[in-house]
Structure formats: C-alpha cells, structure tokens
Amino acid sequence: MKIFLASYLLLVLFLAGGMFANKTKEQSIEDGQEIYQDFCVQCHLADGTGVSGVFPPLKASDYLFENIEKSIAGIKYGLKGKITVNEEDYDGVMLNQGLEEEEIADVMNYILNSWGNSHEEQITTEQVVEIPKSVLE
C-alpha cells in the first residue's frame, strides 16, 4: 500500500509540474495571436497600425518598446490620458479587457513580435503579476 501511495504521489507531482511549466515564447506568441484577434484587433487593426489620432499603432511603436511595463499595465488595468506614439498624440481610453495575467503575457509577446516588431525577451506571467497599477502614474 505504501508503494502504491508513494507512486501515486510521484505521478501527481510529475503531472502538476508539467501543468505549470512555462510555455515557450513561440507558444505564447501563438496563443497571443488568438487573444489579439478577440480583444485588440477592433481598435489596433489586424496589421497593428491603429487609427491615426484615435487608436495608437502597435506596429513599430516607439511608446510600446520604450514603455513595456506601462504597456503591460495598460492592458492589465486599462489606460486613459495622453500618450505620444511615434510623435503623434493620443488622448483616449483603453478599458481593462478582463484578461488574466497569462493572457496579458501572451498578447504582449504577440504584439512585440508581429508586423516587423522584434523583442528578444519573453514576457512572462510572473512579470505581469508583479506590475502594479502605480506604473501608470
């Protein structure tokens, strides 16, 4: 009985470890593409170019790459007020879309690596969890 119980516990630990393993950057980008299509494409468009003066571009966005933590916080908490992207001012509201931390990491990885954008580091769920709302102030 003890051997059975020990074997069962080892199996559970092994399976649980696999469930919580970090996904690869490629898998995160793939998952992020689906999230982008569901939540972001309406404003930022399929090619990430946004709408001049209304919805900022994500493609080749200086704001995005210079403010990665603020960009994550904007998705996590919502964003309002004036920002400047590629020398153009935007003063709108992006509502919190209710995404979970893993979904935010995935969509950020997709955005940072699409339409000619390239970001070497992978955004992780743990990184998203650690970003406080105060980053936006």
Image: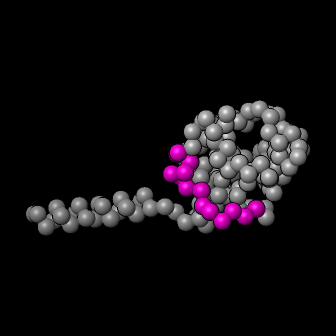
Q: Which residues are magenta?
A: 117-130
Residue, x 61% and y 66% (percent of image)? 26
Q: Position of residue 104 (x, y in %)?
A: 60, 49
Quarter of the picture holding the N terminus: bottom left
Residue, x 29% and y 60% (percent of image)? 12
Residue 54 relative to residue 26: left or right: right
Q: Position of residue 85 (x, y in %)?
A: 83, 46
Colour scheme of the rendered structure: one colour
Report the front residue among 71 and 11.
Answer: 71
Report the front residue among 78 and 45.
Answer: 78
Residue, x 64% and y 47% (percent of image)? 69
Question: Would residue 37 be visible to someone looking at this image?
Answer: no
Q: Position of residue 112 (x, y in %)?
A: 70, 58
Q: Position of residue 56 (x, y in %)?
A: 82, 45
Question: Would residue 136 be visible to someone looking at this image?
Answer: yes
Number of callouts: 0
Quarter of the picture holding the C terminus: top right
**Is 46 within the magenta?**
no
Q: Residue 34 is drawn in which quadrant?
A: bottom right
Residue 47 relative to residue 134: left or right: right
**Is 120 within the magenta?**
yes
Residue 62 relative to residue 34: left or right: right
Up-down relation of residue 37 to residue 12 (above or below): above
Q: Residue furthest left?
A: 1
Up-down relation of residue 48 to residue 89 (above or below): below
Residue, x 77% and y 32% (percent of image)? 81
